[in-house]
Image (tube, rainbow, N blue to C red):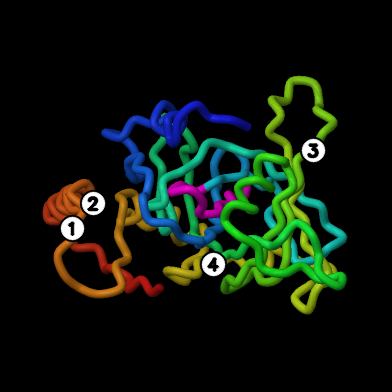
Amino acid sequence: MVFSMPLEEYKRKRKFDQTPEPPAKVEAKAGHRFVVQKHDATRLHYDFRLEMEGVLKSWAVPKGPSLDPADKRLAMQVEDHPVSYFDFEGIIPEDNYGAGTVMVWDVGTWQPLSPVPVQGKYVAGTEAEAVAMLAKGDLKFRLDGKKLKGDFALVKMKGRRPGSKGTEWLLIKKHDDHEVEGYDIDAFDESVLSKRSLAEIAGDEGSAEWRSRPSGRGKLKAAWLADAVAKLDKKNLAKKPIAKKKLRN
């Protein structure tokens, strides 16, 4: 899937005066984080995102990732997202693209793997190799998350179904020490940030606004984030105070 400009499609689909999602911004600093967000939209699915080239390369995975190599999960590539989407957890209001509840299901770091194994094992690759593998449609990488660990591959499907736009990939777990036979993703319905279930997030009025989870206390530097928090604080003053849960990294 090719997008003409970074985050152009992300911006086109959203009304930022209505949605709490962060604005589009390409990061200049390179990073290798990943996030999996459980998203209860029109259909429940998982959004798998890899930080690369200043954005989050993203795929919607209907059944979610698996630690069982026998599972080949369909992954539909979607528009790139800004890196600031990394810890977005809350509610996208009705009548907005992707309306529904979002949970940060897993976070961690990822490492590209060299496309050519060494003595039967995949070794660390480079950023350039990762970009080339993505363009080729066969990206191999290693995850070090709170729930997902080990080697994986994203492989673009060659045979297109009627009506598809060439966005269909398969997310596959490689055989290693982290594989789990019969992996059941439904057994893990808890946010790695707030420790809440999807239902708890959906019922939390405070989640309807963008909330930051800075590592330390202090002034919020991003103007858009400070404005969002200020609006939420003003709204809550007019209501009965809502108990706030402490969010942890």
Q: Position of residue 87 (x, y in %)?
A: 41, 59
Camera-side residue: 58 or 237?
Answer: 58
> Residue under circle 4?
109
Mark 4, secondary structure of its residue? strand
> Residue under circle 1?
221
The three-letter amino acid code for the residue at tag 3 is: Met
- The residue positioned 57% from the left and 74% from the top of the image is 146
- The residue positioned 59% from the left and 52% from the top of the image is 128
Label 2 environment density (alpha carbons within 10 Å; few <14, some 14–19, many ≥20): some
* Mark 3 in CB contact with mark 4 (< 8 angstroms): no
Q: Position of residue 16 (x, y in %)?
A: 31, 35
Q: Nearer the viewer, mark 2 or mark 1?
A: 1
Mark 1, secondary structure of its residue? loop
Label 1 environment density (alpha carbons within 10 Å; few <14, some 14–19, many ≥20): few
- Identify the disc placed on residue 113: none
Image quarter of residue 7? top left
Camera-side residue: 170 or 89?
Answer: 170
Mark 2, secondary structure of its residue? helix
The three-letter amino acid code for the residue at tag 2 is: Leu
Q: CA distance from mark 3 to mark 4?
A: 25 Å
